[in-house]
Amino acid sequence: MDGFTIDTLPDKGLLELVEPQKPREPRKKKQREETDERPKRWRKAAWADTDDDIIAVEGFPSSKFPRKVTPFTDYRSYLVSKFETIYGRPNWATRAAAKRSADEDFDVLAEAGDLITDGKRLPKTNLGFSKCTHLTKLPTIANSVQFHPDRNVTFISGMNGQIDIVNVDGDDNKKLNSVLLENFQLHRACFTTDGEDIIIGSKTTFGYFYNYNMRTSVHSRVPLLMGKDRLALKDFTLSPNGQYLASTGRKNSFYLMSMKPKEIITSFQLNDEVHSLCFSPDSTKLFAGGDEGLIYCYDVRQTKRCFHRFYDDGAISCKSLSISPNTGYFITGDQSGLVNCYKYEDVMTNQNPKPIKNFTNLKTPINSIKFNNSSELAIISSSHADNCVKLVHFPSCTIFSNFPVSFSNLRRVNAVDISPNSGYIALANNLGYAYLYRLNHFPDY
């Protein structure tokens, strides 16, 4: 086996070092006295600040006002909006506003009953977030980052074959292990669906790939052969049910592999080069995109059958594909930076579906699209220019304008991921950094 492990922890598997994620239990509320049926009112402020009541013409030193601000705009509201646009809404302000709203609406709630929503939807205006301690710093280009499906753990991989495994807490982010595969130009790595292993592939190494076991901290070579042909694990994706792996191959081909045992089932051939692959959430369909602006749809249960294809509106070469977990949206990312968002049912029933929204915020090839678990949020990124990351809100299909903040420098983002319960997002860049952000709206990991 070429490769060695550094900082290994042989006495105990990595998964045993971190407790499984448990849903956060709601805080127990103090029982109110029987005579007090109404919730406690928001306490009155101890003092009043006269500056809170002024208008814009009194707050600005000159008569020149920012865009969309008039002389009679509430000055305090303007300052609050400006602060939240740059830094996001602080946790204490969110909690305070929620409590005030609950107290003020007590009488309405008593009468409205089931008409009142739970108020847990992700706001579509500003995204509340905070930057955490970065996950790691590799001595090479970081090209993969992924959260473990049920533990507070993530890995970050680099082009030199190094993989850092980190405990995610937002503060220390302690490194649990670091693995280095010698003479292996790592291109992509991915957790298996059960989180027991990491699959590690390379564009330039043919005939095998690596499997790293999270419990034993041991990595091993896995043969990758189809007849006499030695294949490489390039741009690959795993099915949500953990049964299949699909990878781009040589020239215009791609192939499908079973995960137990790890053997190639079949290969496919298109008329153009294949750049992107994606499974449906139920793992029964496999989608492939290439240079002709066509998306091909295959039934995994009838391996070689292409049962449908459609044109990606206005696209030249499809570089990324993603389907929301609720099977509501199908998103494509093009060579030109065009991002099309379709209804999933439209792409499955039409050869020329029309997108419900297209995004032209990025101007370079889209290399990553990732949905969160509730299908309310997606990250779109390009690794061909600095700071090319956008977060999209669903179902409004709008871009969050306050991420990334204008003064941040994320450099070239090569990989992105969202934690299982959407509490964190991770961004890996060309300088070897893996940045971590906390999304305030989501309470759990």
Image (cartoon, rainbow, N blue to C red):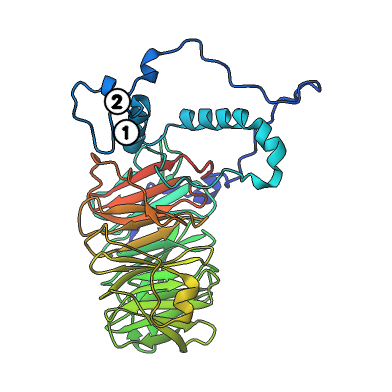
| The quarter of the displayed image where residue 62 is located | top left
Foreground residue among 218 and 146: 146
Give the farthest residue toward the top: 47
Residue 416: quarter of image: bottom left
Q: Residue at x 30, y 76 (%)?
A: 206
- Residue 135 percent coordinates (x, y): 36, 44
Q: Which marked residue is nearer to the observer: mark 1 or mark 2?
A: 2
Question: In the image, residue 269 lies at what x, y percent?
Answer: 35, 88
Q: Residue furthest right?
A: 34
Residue 174, x across and y down, in percent: 41, 39
Q: Is residue 334 left or right of residue 422?
A: left
Tell me the amino acid under the disc marked 2: Ala
Tell me the tag on residue 82: 1
Does the image show residue 387? yes
How busy is the neighbourhood of tag 2: few (under 14 within 10 Å), some, or many (20 plus)? Answer: many
Please determine whether, in this image, residue 370 is positioned above or below residue 74. Answer: below
Amino acid type of the residue tagged 1 in the rendering: Lys
In the rendered image, is residue 179 in sight?
no
- For label 2, the residue is 56
